[in-house]
Image (cartoon, rainbow, N blue to C red):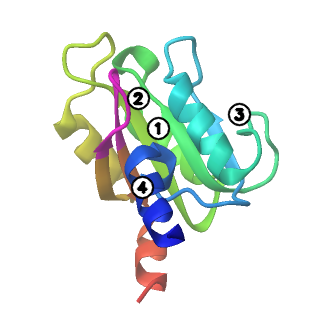
């Protein structure tokens, strides 16, 4: 019966679908009043603690990066985010969906990710206003072999 419950949770919890796990330290960058609160709460529920903010002074297991077109240079934001994560960690890049204020073109995400040395491993809709791209470092991809 618990296997069914686990599968049901994977379908309903975006945080589980995105690979977050209990005990992880997850740093959040780019928080503003337009973020998806349900996603934030889902991540906190899965990891069992609050998200840490941009002032966190240790390395995290993952970074949640909320990014809008007007937030500056995406490549710089991704490079900065990689300095906050453990080797093998991932960045969940969240951008507004098509037609929403701050929308970022997929080609811009792809180019910035590549320039920052990251590979997209998964893209997912994470709410009515946000899309997510799970990005990993090449070291993380190689260490899993």
Labels 3 and 1 touching (C-beta < 8 A)? no
* Residue 142: image location, x then y, percent: 42, 82
Q: Of marks 4 and 3, which one's residue comes earlier in the chain?
A: 4
Labels 4 and 3 touching (C-beta < 8 A)? no
Q: Of marks 2 and 3, which one's residue comes earlier in the chain?
A: 3
* Residue 97: image location, x then y, percent: 26, 24
Q: Which residues are magenta?
A: 124-132
Numbered circle sitting on residue 139: none
Q: Residue at x 17, y 39 (%)?
A: 107
Q: Secondary structure at mark 4?
A: helix
In the foreground, 48 or 54: 48
Q: Of marks 3 and 1, which one's residue comes earlier in the chain?
A: 3
> Mark 3 or 1, which is nearer the eye?
3
Query: In 3D space, how far apart are the residues under numbered discs 3 and 1 (Cα atoms)?
Result: 15 Å
Q: Secondary structure at mark 3?
A: loop
Q: Quadrant of residue 125?
A: top left
Numbered circle sitting on residue 54: 3
Q: Secondary structure at mark 1?
A: helix
Query: In 3D space, how far apart are the residues under numbered discs 1 and 4 (Cα atoms)?
Result: 37 Å
Numbered circle sitting on residue 73: 2
Labels 2 and 1 touching (C-beta < 8 A)? yes
- Furthest residue to the bottom? 145
Labels 1 and 4 touching (C-beta < 8 A)? no
Numbered circle sitting on residue 8: 4
């Amino acid at each position: 019966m618990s296997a069914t419950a686990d599968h049901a949770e994977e379908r309903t919890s975006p945080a589980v679908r995105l690979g977050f796990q209990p005990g992880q330290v997850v740093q959040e960058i780019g928080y503003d009043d337009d973020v998806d609160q349900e996603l934030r709460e889902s991540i906190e529920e899965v990891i069992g603690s609050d998200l840490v903010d941009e002032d966190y002074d240790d390395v995290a297991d993952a970074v949640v990066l909320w990014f809008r077109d007007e937030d500056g240079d995406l490549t710089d934001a991704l490079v900065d985010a990689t300095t906050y994560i453990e080797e093998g960690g991932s960045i969940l890049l969240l951008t507004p969906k098509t037609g929403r204020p701050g929308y970022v073109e997929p080609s811009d995400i792809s180019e910035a990710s590549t320039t920052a040395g990251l590979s997209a491993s998964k893209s997912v809709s994470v709410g009515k206003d946000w899309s997510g791209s799970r990005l990993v470092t090449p070291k993380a991809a190689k260490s899993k072999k």
